[in-house]
């Protein structure tokens, strides 16, 4: 989830902030997946559940403990969903984005990619030496929801330009 005030120090994290992180980044996904799975089972055609986690589920960064905990919970949740939904032809997976541009393009409703992140700032922490685009996430969703991804279940796909492979989060 992208919303203001996602990071907060350990000692500034109160119960309301913690609950907000869990509600928006974990609880909402659980109940949406539950509802979707019920509908998919009722229709009898199987289906795909895709959640958006984050690179914060893989590594700790100062002031991101609550958010990272919720996103790590999503990684575990899709594993449980994969097991719980076995026999129904329903897969459940996560995508964990890294530094993705979230600035919207101006004036063109048919384009999802806004201006990329400043490559000079990311070059030291992302081996791809550039930020990702919303279309990179969309392509991962397309893979997981197509026949190409039909045998991927209970997994999290990193779309991070190699950030976690380089273990340079927070540098």
Image (cartoon, rainbow, N blue to C red):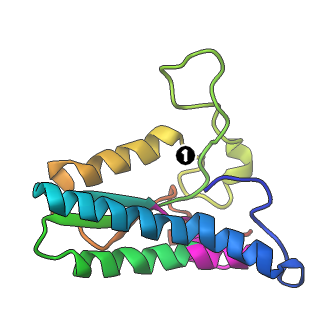
Residue 90 located within the stretch drawn in magenta? no
Classify 20 as above or below 60. Answer: above
Q: x and y percent of residue 158 in the render?
A: 44, 63
Q: Secondary structure at mark 1?
A: loop
Q: Is residue 169 visible?
A: no
Q: Residue at x 35, y 68 (%)?
A: 34
Q: Nearer the viewer, residue 55 or 27?
A: 27
The residue under the point 20% across, 64% down is 90
Q: Which sits in the foreground, 114 or 81?
A: 81
Question: Left or right of 97: which side holds 47?
Answer: left
Q: In the picture, which quadrant includes the N terminus? A: bottom right
Q: What residue lies at 53% left-to-right and 77% top-to-bottom? A: 72
The front one of 31 and 99 is 31
Residue 79 lies, with reference to residue 53, above or below; the image says below
How packed mark 1 is, by other alpha carbons closer than 10 Å (few <14, some 14-19, many 20 or more), is: many
Q: Which residue is mark 1?
A: 132
Bounds of the magenta segment: 52-70
The furthest residue to the bottom: 11
Q: Residue furthest right?
A: 12
Q: Left of 12 or right of it: where is 149?
A: left
Residue at the spot x=50%, y=70% of the render?
A: 165
- 52, above or below 130, in the image: below
In the image: residue 103, left or right of residue 142: right
Horizontally, residue 32 falls left or right of residue 36, namely right
Q: Quadrant of residue 91?
A: bottom left
Q: Is residue 36 visible?
A: yes
Residue 71: where, in percent of width, then height? 55, 72
Residue 139, image x, y percentages: 36, 43
């Amino acid at each position: 989830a992208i919303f203001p005030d996602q990071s907060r120090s350990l000692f500034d994290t109160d119960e309301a902030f913690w609950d907000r992180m869990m509600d928006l980044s974990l609880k909402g996904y659980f109940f949406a997946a539950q509802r979707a799975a019920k509908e998919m089972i009722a229709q009898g055609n199987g289906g795909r559940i895709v959640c958006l986690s984050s690179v914060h589920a893989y590594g700790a960064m100062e002031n991101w403990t609550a958010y990272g905990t919720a996103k790590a919970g999503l990684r575990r949740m899709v594993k449980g969903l994969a097991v719980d939904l076995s026999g129904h032809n329903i897969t459940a997976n996560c995508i964990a984005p890294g530094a993705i541009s979230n600035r919207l393009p101006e004036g063109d409703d048919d384009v999802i990619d806004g201006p990329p992140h400043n490559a000079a700032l990311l070059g030291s922490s992302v081996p791809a030496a550039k930020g990702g685009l919303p279309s990179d996430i969309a392509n991962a969703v397309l893979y997981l929801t197509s026949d190409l991804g039909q045998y991927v279940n209970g997994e999290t796909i990193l779309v991070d330009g190699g950030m976690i492979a380089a273990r340079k989060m927070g540098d």
